[in-house]
Amino acid sequence: GYFTSELDRISGALPVDFNKQRFALNFVSLIQDKPELQKYSKEVLATALVRSAQDNLDALNNEVYIYKGYNDKLTYTPSYKGLRKMAIEKSVRPIKDIYAKPIYEKDTVEETFMNGETKLVYKSNFMNRGKWIGVLAVCVFLDNSEIYELMDMEDIAAVQKKSKNSGAWRDFPIEMAKKSVEVLYNKLKGLENQTHIYTI
């Protein structure tokens, strides 16, 4: 009831078809599933609830990570899945699809130039991939044009270093690496230096 009333308080900032009751129940389920969250006050937890509701990201659906972060602060970080959803919902230019993939040694990634546009061709050697060496993110617009970003392990390590003691990096390394190709999201939104990590 407390969480639903907090959502009522910000109802003007929520999407038109937002289901407050279901969202609050999902949030309670998340807290019940994660004992480490139960030590935080309902006011602190409600801050994470409100932020995720405003972003329209459901923690129970792994669209956002809510976890004990640095110095025991409750931390809110949109996942790769959440950033993808935000980019599709908020991009001025209509998007057909966004995807990110971990790249392994035996996979192939080729840049091609067709009809005046650069495209990326990715092929996974599914049965024998070797070690993980990077991540790739591609955004395909409705007109079939695309933008993409590649990061090697050195780039990924540099991002991870900035998120010291992050529970999300410890528990979801590949998902966080996929999320780290967020320069793609920044290009869509015209943002710079966007970290998408909040301590509460």
Image (tube, grey):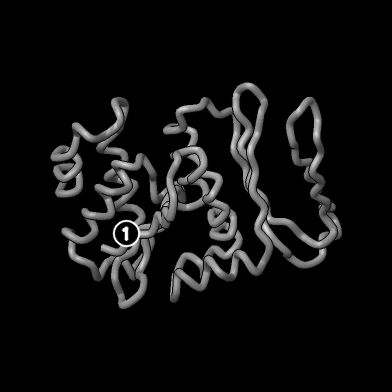
Query: Measuring 35% from the left and 39% from the top, which residue is drawn there?
Result: 56
Please provide percent x and percent y for residue 164: 44, 74
Q: Residue furthest front?
A: 116
> Which amino acid type is shown beneath numbered disc 1?
Ile
Q: Which residue is mark 1?
A: 31
Categorize mark 1 by other alpha carbons within 10 Å: few (<14), some (14-19), many (20+).
Answer: some
Please provide percent x and percent y for residue 66: 37, 59
Please provide percent x and percent y for residue 189: 45, 39
Q: Secondary structure at mark 1?
A: helix
Q: Nearer the viewer, residue 42 or 198?
A: 198
Q: Nearer the viewer, residue 56 or 27?
A: 56
Tell me if 179 is positioned left or right of 75 in this view.
right
Query: Measuring 26% from the left and 37% from the top, which residue is drawn there?
Result: 20
- The quarter of the picture where residue 197 lies is bottom left
Figure check: 145 above or below 2:
above
Query: Measuring 51% from the left and 73% from the top, which residue is drawn there?
Result: 161
- The quarter of the picture where residue 144 lies is top right
Figure check: 75 above or below 78:
below
Figure check: 1 above or below 95:
below
Tell me if 153 is positioned left or right of 50 in this view.
right
Tell me if 65 is positioned left or right of 98 in this view.
left
Q: Nearer the viewer, residue 56 or 24?
A: 56
Query: Measuring 29% from the left and 52% from the top, which residue is drawn there?
Result: 28
Please provide percent x and percent y for residue 4: 19, 43
Q: Which of the image's four quarters has the C terminus?
A: bottom left
Tell me if 124 is positioned left or right of 4 in this view.
right
Figure check: 39 above or below 109:
below
Instruction: Evaluate whether residue 32 shows in this view.
Output: no
- The quarter of the picture where residue 106 lies is bottom right
